[in-house]
């Protein structure tokens, strides 16, 4: 089993929060919040995948 990695855990929590905020924004029909949440999700996921690739290359 792998050891606990707090950085990747925080990235996973941020991505989950962005997904939840997309659902909440859709429920309130607030288009700017939907767009901001989707952008935040892509940004957090991109950072996570790039860090994973950098860690794998080392």
Image: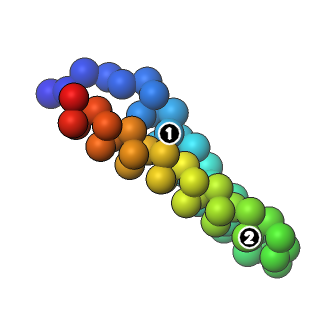
Q: Which mark is residue 49?
A: none
The residue shown at (22%, 37%) is 56
Residue underneath mark 2: 34
Left or right: residue 44 versus residue 27 is left
Determine whether the residue tagged by mark 2 lies in a helix, strand or loop: helix
Label located before the other in sequence (1 or 2): 1
| Residue 12, position as x, y percentages in the image | 47, 43
Q: How is the image coloured?
A: rainbow
Question: Taking the image as drawn, is residue 40 in sight?
Answer: yes
Give the x, y percent position of residue 32.
83, 70
- Using the image, determine if residue 39 lies above or below residue 49: below
- Which residue lies under the disc numbered 1? 11
- Image: 3 above or below 56: above
Secondary structure beneath dot 1 equals: helix
Query: Where in the figure is residue 55, as x and y percent of width and height?
Result: 28, 33
Is residue 20 visible from the viewing direction of this image? no
């Amino acid at each position: 089993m792998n050891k606990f990695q707090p950085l990747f855990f925080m990235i996973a929590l941020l991505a989950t929060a962005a997904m939840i905020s997309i659902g909440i924004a859709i429920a309130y029909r607030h288009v700017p919040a939907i767009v901001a949440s989707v952008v935040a999700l892509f940004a957090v996921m991109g950072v996570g995948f790039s860090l994973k690739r950098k860690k794998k290359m080392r």
